């Protein structure tokens, strides 16, 4: 596996792969890789000739007071995991390689980024879109793989690629879960044993919400209330939001109809966790 830390070397390697007739798969990450990331890398490696994994803890997507400095890191472990999953290139840029100081140009995906995560973290998805736009420009034409665990991020990145005509096919991949339902996340590392035991309530509340919709519930407020109350009943959970939206547009739907996504966010101690499930309202 080739390792790069500069934009120029990364571009050169991926341009070379395409010039040889190969296709490029891109897996953008912030490192501290887990089996959820492994599933993205393995899928990219299975579907593309050359797979590039990027590790960049992107300061632009953290607000002051969030966990930028504490964000878990393990470059040696990440390199071993990426290579074992079939990555051909690992791009680990230093901050100054990614951002000129000050950063004047950012990417806003307007109302798609303004609700859900955008209410508690108003600058977060702008930071994500800006970093991902840069990674798309650096990688060039490719298929880019993102997990559905960050469902709003996936929608924002898809829309950005469409709006800005990036030559990138955005591929959403299923969430990987622990046996008790907890979605894998680098931030699970922050959970104390008691918080870890409590955290699967996030997933199970969503599953209960989806079952209610599948059984005929068509009032979004009822689904929000059901999911939110289940999470809030867990003493170690501090509910941020529970929402049900159209899966493609992330817009509110009333009465509930079509392909929907139920999403929730809650804090468990230092860890702010998010999750979502799909449900169809016939
Ligand atoms: O999901 C992540 O790890 C990050 O938000 C991403 C997409 C790598 C952008 O920094």
Image (cartoon, helix red, strand yellow):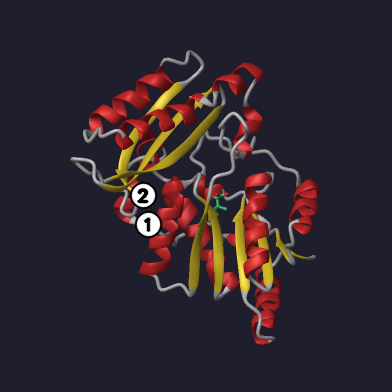
| Secondary element at tag 1 | loop
Q: Which residue is mark 1?
A: 108
**Residue 54 appearing in the image:** no
Residue 161 vs 130, above or below: the answer is below
Q: Is residue 210 left or right of residue 26?
A: left
* Quarter of the view holding residue 97: bottom right
Along the line of sight, which residue is nearer the eye, 26 or 108?
A: 26
Q: Is residue 168 left or right of residue 278?
A: right
| Residue 231 percent location from the top left of the image | 42, 22
Residue 68 vs 228, above or below: the answer is below
**Residue at left 33%, top 54%?**
248
| Residue 230 percent location from the top left of the image | 40, 20
Q: Is residue 166 left or right of residue 67?
A: left
**Residue at left 38%, top 61%?**
159
| Residue 143 percent location from the top left of the image | 55, 68
* Quarter of the view holding residue 279: top left
Q: CA gap, disc 2 to disc 1? A: 8 Å
Q: Which residue is mark 2?
A: 113
Residue 228 vs 54, above or below: the answer is above
Q: Disc 2 or disc 1, which is closer to the eye?
A: 2
* Quarter of the view holding residue 185: top right
Residue 86 vs 116, above or below: the answer is below
| Residue 39 percent location from the top left of the image | 64, 52
| Secondary element at tag 2 | helix
């Amino acid at each position: 596996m080739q390792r790069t830390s500069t934009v120029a070397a990364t571009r050169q390697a991926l341009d070379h792969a395409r010039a040889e007739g190969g296709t490029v798969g891109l897996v953008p990450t912030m490192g501290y890789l887990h089996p959820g990331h492994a599933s993205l890398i393995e899928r990219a490696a299975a579907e593309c000739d050359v797979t590039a994994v990027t590790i960049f803890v992107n300061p632009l997507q953290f607000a002051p007071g969030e966990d930028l400095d504490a964000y878990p890191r393990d470059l040696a472990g990440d390199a071993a995991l990426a290579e074992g999953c079939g990555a051909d290139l690992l791009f680990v840029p230093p901050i100054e390689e990614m951002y000129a100081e000050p950063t004047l140009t950012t990417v806003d995906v307007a109302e798609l980024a303004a609700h859900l995560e955008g209410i508690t973290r108003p600058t977060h998805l702008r930071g994500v879109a800006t970093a991902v736009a840069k990674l798309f420009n650096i990688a060039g034409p490719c298929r880019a793989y993102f997990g559905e665990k960050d469902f709003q991020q996936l929608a924002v990145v898809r829309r950005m690629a469409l709006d800005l005509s990036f030559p990138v096919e955005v591929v959403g991949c299923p969430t990987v879960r622990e046996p008790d339902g907890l979605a894998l996340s680098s931030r699970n590392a922050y959970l104390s044993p008691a918080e870890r035991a409590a955290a699967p309530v996030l997933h199970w509340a969503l599953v209960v919400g989806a079952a209610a919709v599948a059984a005929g519930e068509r009032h979004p407020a009822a689904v929000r209330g059901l999911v939110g109350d289940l999470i809030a009943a867990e003493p170690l959970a501090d509910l941020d939001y529970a929402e049900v939206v159209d899966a493609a547009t992330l817009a509110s739907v009333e009465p509930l109809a079509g392909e929907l996504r139920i999403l929730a966010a809650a804090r468990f101690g230092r860890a702010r966790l998010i999750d979502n499930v799909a449900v169809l309202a016939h």
